[in-house]
Amino acid sequence: MSSPPAIRAGRLQDRLAAFAAIGATAKNGVNRQALTAGDRQARRLLAELGSARGFAVSQDAAANLFLRREGRDPSLPPLLLGSHLDTQPTGGRFDGALGVLAALEVLEALADAGVETPRAVEVVAWTNEEGSRFSPGCFGSRAFAAGRIDPAWENALSLDGERLGDELAATLAALTEAAMRPLGGTIAGYLELHIEQGPVLEREEIAVGAVTGIQGTRWLEIAIAGAAAHAGTTPSSFRRDPMVAAAASLHDLYGNVMPRDENARLTVGRLRAEPGSINAVPERVIFSVDIRHPDPARLDAIEAHVRRTCAHAAAAAGCRSEASILFDMPPLTFPDAMVALVEDAATRQGFSVRRMVSGAFHDALFVARVAPAAMIFVPCRDGISHNEAEDVEPRHAAAGAATLLECALAAA
Ligand code: GLV
Ligand code: MN
Ligand code: MN
């Protein structure tokens, strides 16, 4: 009699190390932003690992990459397991990669044990989850759920002036041996393992988080326009300085939004002055505002507050402010049966488990629009993520992968 499928923790660690080497930074992190040469190299390695095990490799027009292990009945919709391989500019080794490589480990564990599943199980690596090189994020999973690529997304430009559509075409062309498949399609369900990216599981010494939902995210871009002027000669009464307005806006936003609502998050992670000359009052200052809240009405209220604050600060400085929405994701609740699937799987394996809401967004948010989806969280050290110091204990990575395998066996 063959033994039941089991995760090989050492193999998972080796894979995590191999992918962490692609785009490795001096501080032990990873810079493998979406659709760069590093991203293409990581996709190639995943495709090679899959081919070596006899899994069918395919990609769609959004460069989502799939490895398929066939089931008994190929006509049944597959179960999808995955996450993303792109990282933040100063990202860690686990955000995204853990979910993809644990999914590969599940496929290999099934193959090692010779288990035949009724339906196919597929690993997916979604394109551009992070949204830091090309905004907005979750490009691949959104395109998959919509069954189409919005032409507006293809025209997104990176800070270095590259067009997403061009980088996408080059990324697809770099992996011609992957069969092209239609974008979207029917799937039976989707499971995503991810690091928590926050401190709760570690603090409570709990091995597994069963994610009940994802809080809402809204990204705004604020552009404040004033008048360029000579830095050495222009007295303040003659200036229309957008930096003065930006500084006043940020002072108000940081002083009022989070301090008045413990569930709110507000982050200005990108700010630039144009033309960006040391000795000129800038013509324009442009900054991003990332707002998060579990309650959509509060997201609306915070957005209105941001718009009002920036408009007032701009007017006071003789400038004009414009706000545009870059990304808007309402909060999501996963189906209770899927949350219970994770809880039961973790419990059967002997892992402690708790229900929790995700503060970060994930590809599961979009895949949940077309199929029942669930997410499994594991602890990360000090809750640190979007940082090169991100770290996950091998036992936690293995527990997450074992829970993913258990869920997959139940769902496939
Ligand atoms: C995902 O990377 C997020 O910013 O929540
Ligand atoms: Mn992620
Ligand atoms: Mn991330």
Image (cartoon, grey):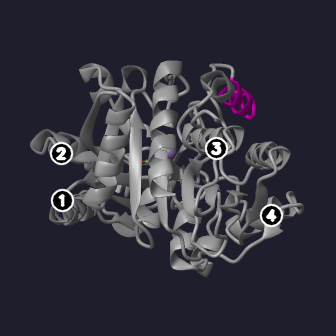
The crowding category of the residue bearing disc 1, from other C-alpha atoms within 10 Å (few below 14, some 14 to 19, many at least 20), is some
Q: Amino acid at mark 4?
A: Leu
Measure how far apart labels 1 and 2 are at the Cα level. 9 Å
Measure how far apart labels 3 and 4 are at the Cα level. 29 Å
Q: Which residues are magenta?
A: 14-25
Q: How many numbered badges does the structure rendering display? A: 4
Q: Amino acid at mark 2?
A: Asn
Q: Nearer the viewer, mark 2 or mark 4?
A: 4
Q: Earlier in the sequence, mark 1 or mark 4?
A: 4
Q: Which residue is mark 1?
A: 295
In the displayed structure image, the side of residue 313 where residue 197 appears, left or right: right
Measure how far apart labels 3 and 2 are at the Cα level. 41 Å
Q: Earlier in the sequence, mark 2 or mark 4?
A: 4
In the image, which disc is placed on residue 340? Answer: none
Q: Which residue is mark 4?
A: 172
In the image, which disc is placed on residue 263? Answer: 2
Q: Nearer the viewer, mark 1 or mark 3?
A: 3
Q: Earlier in the sequence, mark 1 or mark 2?
A: 2
Measure how far apart labels 1 and 3 are at the Cα level. 40 Å
Measure how far apart labels 2 and 4 are at the Cα level. 40 Å
Q: Is residue 3 above or below residue 81?
A: above
